[in-house]
Image (spheres, rainbow, N blue to C red):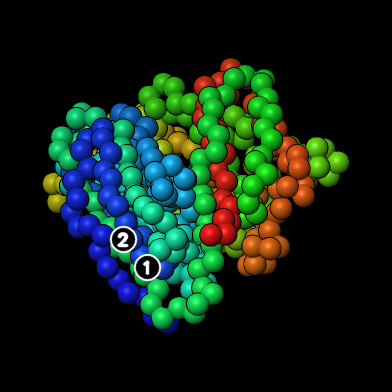
């Protein structure tokens, strides 16, 4: 068996605020689509807003089968997290907001359990039609001209007759805005073995694009129960789950950020919790700067605040943190075989109860629940 690389499209145009669509081939065993989205921002248009990375504007990535069946339905930041969760690197692209240099976002859509899974993926011959759709919610104030998309397919050739019996269906199953001291009571669907339950938690941003609170206050308590409460799987805070994920995965998460934010404004770091940062001044006049990069002390949330100085310029940071793209995960794939994963029908009802802290700063946050399930086809 070997992998054949074939471009679906190169330099396809993604209209600002629009959707790009393309049909996939009628046959072939598709393991991964490697996507590259690029765009040139309006000069200094993202200095005072929390959405300063191009993937923050990729509002929906979908792969739809036979016109209506969801295969993938996620956002850009979630796609970035999943690429890392499947074994990829955490920082394949640089986040920066100086001038109008091209922004880039590379991400794989894995239809198997990882990048180039030789046993699992999408058998296109079993579908009448499969279409990829990528949507952005940018405005002309951020990107004056269309983004470009490259899509490279990885097709398994010479695979055994029994290969690719099914694929991973990954979708944003629920999204809601948080209300102070409120609980969302969710019963998970009973179809298809569940590999992973992913929770993405965004605090609201207030004055100068700084996060109002930490993510673990937005999602203050998580209850996960099986068999309508007979089996208690989890009852605790989001931060505890972040640390569980860190020790289970065993990889430090680093982010490379080049900030040209206005002083006292927040830098959205890509972490649920920021543990530390080192910085360097990036002066454009070729001379040594008079001031070192400075962040407000004691902040460990999803944003870091630039401090005021009389010599503002671009600053580079290497940051360490937890919860890439503000995501946490319950994993059920310690064994690679889908038959061993969480059986939602046998464990019904699977209850996921999500509670927001009784604090005004925890209001107006965003919580997403993403389900990653195996579908035999």
Find the distance from the CA under tag 2 to the CA under tag 1.
7 Å
The answer to whether residue 179 is left or right of residue 9 is right
* Residue drawn at x 45%, y 26% as measured from the top left: 205
**Which secondary structure lies at badge 1?**
loop
* Residue drawn at x 32%, y 56% as measured from the top left: 24
Q: Nearer the viewer, residue 37 or 168?
A: 168
Q: Is residue 2 above or below residue 43?
A: below
Q: Which residue is mark 1?
A: 28
- Whole-percent x and y of residue 122? 45, 62
* Residue drawn at x 37%, y 68% as measured from the top left: 28
Label number found at residue 25: 2
Q: Residues within 10 Å of mark 1 (few under 14, many from 20)?
A: some
Callout 2 touching callout 1 (CB < 8 Å): yes
Q: Is residue 243 visible?
A: no
Label number found at residue 154: none
Q: Quadrant of the N terminus?
A: bottom left
**Which secondary structure lies at badge 2?**
loop
Q: Nearer the viewer, residue 70 or 300?
A: 70
């Amino acid at each position: 068996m070997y992998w054949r690389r074939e471009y679906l499209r190169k330099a396809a145009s993604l209209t600002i605020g629009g959707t790009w669509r393309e049909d996939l081939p009628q046959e072939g065993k598709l393991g991964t689509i490697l996507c590259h989205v690029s765009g040139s921002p309006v000069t200094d248009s993202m200095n005072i807003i929390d959405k300063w990375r191009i993937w923050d504007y990729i509002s929906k990535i979908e792969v739809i089968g036979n016109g209506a069946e969801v295969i993938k339905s996620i956002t850009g930041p979630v796609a970035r997290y999943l690429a890392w969760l499947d074994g990829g690197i955490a920082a394949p692209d640089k986040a920066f907001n100086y001038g109008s240099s091209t922004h880039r976002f590379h991400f794989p859509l894995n239809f198997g359990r990882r990048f180039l899974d030789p046993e699992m993926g999408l058998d296109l011959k079993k579908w009448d039609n499969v279409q990829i759709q990528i949507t952005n919610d940018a405005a002309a104030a951020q990107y004056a001209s269309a983004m470009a998309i490259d899509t490279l397919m990885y097709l398994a050739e010479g695979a055994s007759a029994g290969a690719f019996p099914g694929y991973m269906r990954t979708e944003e199953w629920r999204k809601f805005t948080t209300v102070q001291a409120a609980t969302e009571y969710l019963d998970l669907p009973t179809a298809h073995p569940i590999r992973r339950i992913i929770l993405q938690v965004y605090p609201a941003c207030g004055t100068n694009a700084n996060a109002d609170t930490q993510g673990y206050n937005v999602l203050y308590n998580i209850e996960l129960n099986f068999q309508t409460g007979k089996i208690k799987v989890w009852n605790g805070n989001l931060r505890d789950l972040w640390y569980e994920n860190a020790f289970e995965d065993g990889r430090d998460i680093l982010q490379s950020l080049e900030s040209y934010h206005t002083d006292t404004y927040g830098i959205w770091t890509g972490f649920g919790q920021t543990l530390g940062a080192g910085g360097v001044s990036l002066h454009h006049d070729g001379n040594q700067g008079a001031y070192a990069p400075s962040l407000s002390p004691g902040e460990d949330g999803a944003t870091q605040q630039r401090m005021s100085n009389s010599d503002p310029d671009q600053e580079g940071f290497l940051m360490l943190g937890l919860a890439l793209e503000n995501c946490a995960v319950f994993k059920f794939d310690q064994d690679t075989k889908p038959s061993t994963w969480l059986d939602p029908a046998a464990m019904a009802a699977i209850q996921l109860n999500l509670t927001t802290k009784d604090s005004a700063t925890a209001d107006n946050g965003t919580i997403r629940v993403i389900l990653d399930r195996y579908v035999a086809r």
